[in-house]
Image (tube, rainbow, N blue to C red):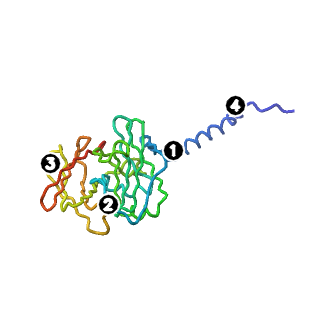
């Protein structure tokens, strides 16, 4: 009767499988996508509330949208986010309004995390309707204001942006401010505290139905080195007669 093999070769053979398993695990980890550590989900307060009513009469705030110009397509992809404030906690109200006023939503979010990129979960039950508006720029406006949704005329706005899922960071680019001009015939904007201070034209939206907003102010890019918050002054005129100016702050721009 032969004795069990106890040679060094036999012992080495007994340890080959664990090392191979470890090597395979390391290879798997190397090729798996790793989520960006600084993108954190804000907490939606309750269920997502949204409405669609083709026949509407809109009356409301002058400021209807403050957003990155590419944020419109992030809604249907659930890739909408903001930069959180330095305090590490945030309560905010996200409003989405179609240009014709038919689609609207208003939802509160909360986060108690350290400063990070906050994704705002937006799982619409009206994907076809929302997708029709979010398929091209200018047809949907987004605001994310500081505080709860009960504030009637907020002045502090976060900047909703699209998440670049390939790079795990927020997409840059121009900023769009959508204005309900009411009776205004001309609208202008300027960035204060940036060394420029000149008023620039906002463009009247001529095409299609524009019940909810009818002017678009396009900021080509945020000034490099600009302070946060960035203060924007909005001036409206009715045939040359100035109306009361409006000032907003765009928070956490950097």
Q: Check whether the beta carbons of the residues at disc 2 and disc 4 lie within 8 A of each other.
A: no
Could you tell whether 32 is left or right of 153 in the image?
Answer: right
Pick the front one: 172 or 249: 249
Q: In the picture, which quadrant includes the N terminus?
A: top right
**How far apart are labels 1 and 3 at the CA level?**
50 Å
Crowdedness of circle 3 by 10 Å Cα count: few (<14), some, many (20+)?
A: few
Q: Looking at the image, tell me whether mark 4 or mark 3 is earlier in sequence order.
A: 4
Residue 33 rendering spot, x and y as whole percentages? 49, 47
User: Alpha carbon of mark 3 to alpha carbon of mark 2: how far?
Assistant: 28 Å
Q: Which residue is drawn at 36% across and 54% down?
A: 71
Cα gap from disc 4 to disc 3, whole angstroms: 81 Å
**Element carrying mark 2:** loop
Residue under pointer 2: 212
| Of labels 3 and 2, the one closer to you | 2
Q: Where is residue 138 in the image (x, y as percent from the top left)?
A: 32, 61
Residue visible at 42% across and 39% down in the picture: 111
Can you tell which of label 4 and label 3 is closer to the viewer?
A: 3
Residue 136 image offset from top left, x and y in percent: 36, 63
Q: Which of marks 1 and 2 is nearer the N terminus?
A: 1
The residue at which mark 4 appears reads as 8
In the displayed structure, 94 sits above or below 110; it is below
| Disc 4 element | helix
Q: Disc 1 or disc 2, which is closer to the eye?
A: 2
Cα separation, mark 1 vs mark 2, equals 49 Å
**Residue linked to disc 1:** 30
Residue that mark 3 sits on:
197
| Secondary structure at numbered mark 1 | helix
In the depicted view, which residue is nearer to us: 243 or 18?
Answer: 243
């Amino acid at each position: 009767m032969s004795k069990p093999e106890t040679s060094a070769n036999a012992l080495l053979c007994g340890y080959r499988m664990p090392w191979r398993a470890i090597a395979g695990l390391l290879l798997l980890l190397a090729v798996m996508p790793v989520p960006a550590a600084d993108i954190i989900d804000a907490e939606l307060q309750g269920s997502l509330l949204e409405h669609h009513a083709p026949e509407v009469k809109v009356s409301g705030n002058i400021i209807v949208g403050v957003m990155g110009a590419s944020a419109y397509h992030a809604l249907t992809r659930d890739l909408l986010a903001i930069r959180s404030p330095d305090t590490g906690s945030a309560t905010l109200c996200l409003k989405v309004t179609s240009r014709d006023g038919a689609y609207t939503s208003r939802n509160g979010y909360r986060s108690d995390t350290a400063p990070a990129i906050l994704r705002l979960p937006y799982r619409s039950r009206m994907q076809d309707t929302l997708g029709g508006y979010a398929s091209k720029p200018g047809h949907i406006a987004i605001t994310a204001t500081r505080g709860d949704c009960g504030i009637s005329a907020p002045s502090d706005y976060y900047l909703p942006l699209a998440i670049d899922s390939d790079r795990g960071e927020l997409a840059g680019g121009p900023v769009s401010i959508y204005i309900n001009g009411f009776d205004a015939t001309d609208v202008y904007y300027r960035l204060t505290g940036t060394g420029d201070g000149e008023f620039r034209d906002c463009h009247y939206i001529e095409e299609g139905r524009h019940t909810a907003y009818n002017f678009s102010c396009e900021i080509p890019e945020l000034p490099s080195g600009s302070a946060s918050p960035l203060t924007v002054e909005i001036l409206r005129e009715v045939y040359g007669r100035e109306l009361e100016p409006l000032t907003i702050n765009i928070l956490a721009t950097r």
